[in-house]
Image (tube, rainbow, N blue to C red):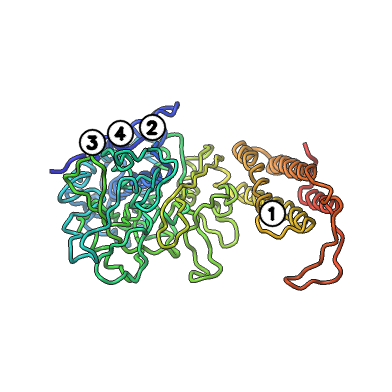
Amino acid sequence: MGRFNLLDEPWIRVVASDDGRCEEVSLKDVFENAHTYKGLGGEMKAQDFAVFRLLLAVLHTVFSRVDSAGEIYGCDDVDGSVHTYFKLDERMRPLAEVEEDDVDDYAGSLYDTWESLWNRGSFPPCMNEYLERWRDRFFLFDETYPFFQVREADIGEGKINKSSGSSIAGKNINRRISESGNKKALFSPRTDKNDNKSFLTEAELARWLVTYQGYCGLSDKVIFGKEKYEAKVSKGWLFDLGGLCIKGKTLFESLLLNLALVRPDQPEALYAQKPCWEYSPQEMIERYLRDRNTPRRIDNLAELYTLWSRAIYIDPETDMSKPFAFEVVKLPDVAHVDHFIEPMTLWRFNKQGDNKDRYTPRKHREEQSLWRSFGLISGKGENEREPGVIQWITDESISPCIQGRRYRLVAVTMKDDGNATSWVPVNEITDTLRLHEKLLTDEGWEKRVNDVVDMTNRVVQNIYGRFMYEVKDIRNVKQDGFVEREIAQLYYAVDEPFRQWIARIQPSEDKESTIDTWKKTLKKIVKDQADHFVAQAGPRDFIGRVCSKESGDNKEGEGEYKNIATAYNAFSYFLNKQLDVEEG
């Protein structure tokens, strides 16, 4: 008999009130009351991102098959009868794909369903009707269909290259600890006493299980079969993403804003949805191993949102009052290059390397705020591609429903340990950008904001950066890092004012006046930073020296005299030329 069914047992952490109070709720509760919750409130934003995608997988599955009233998609024939685009079995699975002649009408019906859900303001009963039909697949502990797991026989001896799977302790899947057997985690939220770090409740295990499938690393050793996979081993699909989602006022709004039911540039997104729980553990393994030599491409979002990185075995008789551990076996990775069906990531255009002239997911950078990647978000720069969730909210069928609203763009990336042989997750990188929807849906505003970001980067990196390079030359500093450190300090000073400026933009305002406001602010910040630097300068900086003109390793001529005053004058000239506004 299975135990701890995720449909009924509380395990998903949600923010239930404006004061930030969190509580654990079941999967059915989430969909029944999503309109009353503020959002997810798990232990980490990376965990929330993984669980959020699981919820989206359920939504994509249900509303690709039935509309907001729970009716199968179809249209009226000329004779007055109803023509359905497909038939469903007793578990609400389509028995065939949508026929080519019906694809356009089907896509139109999906748009109508999304609008109906948005106007309704809550999820209909058909959500839980679907879940009930698959109740047997949502037991955390089960001998036949364990959730997100396999059976012991599926990783038995003879099927893998070791006698058993790699043992992963609770302290390793708990990403607030991420401690291996070889290295202690500093500043752990739990003590070592009595192996306390490896204790988990059933609810914690369920959340970290979903998270582990998305972010696992490569430190384990066991694979299926005796030969290495020609395709790379997965370290977790989410691990390589520059995760991006849109946050609304409630969890319901957030889910709808990211529920890209139609992708005009990705027609395969209309294919039948294949979430992992609709397959047996053996079928799941077979699906992955068929592509052990060539990275597999996914053709539906429910499958993408429930990807496995490991075949995980948890003993159904596990006693959760004892330190927890499970066994894992590596699975082959899926394709990364030009895999545009993934809507929740930034994309990088590769100008060199094995993936030259193609796109791969781009992770967020710890030292770079989200607004500095506005070109990647808007897709307006050269060779920059708009993320799918941004395409969705700017779709002409969707944007009228959300016009006039403000929302937050939330960025999530898992940081690794820098070791290419293990890729142990060690920390998360998160950021939030609040802005009016017109800055992404109105082409005029979108372009102007992107221009402002480019201008800001030029001022910081080129104009102030050039000033710092001059100082470095005057001081004859040889070690690396001086200029980068000073530029990072200026970006820190610019960061919060820029966030406030972009959050306050009203689309009805005059664009030039709004941009001039930022130019004045930026000019003052940069000038103040330079003035402060000069005020700290010593006699040697003002005395200066004759600096050689260099081209690579070859010196040219006798050089020129520089001191911090001449460098500052040049800086001021270029700053005033770039930001031709009076400080205010």
Rounded to the nearest angstrom, the CA distance separating label 2 from label 3 is 18 Å
* Quarter of the picture holding the C terminus: top right
**Residue 167 at what x, y percent from top left?**
27, 54
Residue bearing mark 1:
483
- Please give left or right for residue 503 compared with residue 326 in the image: right
Observer-nearest of 247 and 546? 546
**Residue 473 at what x, y percent from top left?**
77, 59
Q: Nearer the viewer, mark 1 or mark 2?
A: 1
Q: Residue furthest bottom?
A: 554
Residue bearing mark 2:
37
Amino acid type of disc 4?
Val
Task: Say the numbered circle drawn on residue 25.
Answer: 4
Element under disc 3: loop
Q: Residues within 10 Å of mark 2 (few under 14, many from 20)?
A: many
Q: Residues within 10 Å of mark 3 (few under 14, many from 20)?
A: some
* Quarter of the picture holding the N terminus: top left
Q: Residues within 10 Å of mark 1 (few under 14, many from 20)?
A: some
Q: Nearer the viewer, mark 2 or mark 4?
A: 4
Q: Going from the N terminus, do you reach mark 2 or mark 3 first?
A: 3
Task: Say the numbered circle drawn on residue 201.
Answer: none
Q: Going from the N terminus, do you reach mark 2 or mark 4 first?
A: 4
Rounded to the nearest angstrom, the CA distance separating label 1 from label 4 is 50 Å
Residue bearing mark 3:
8
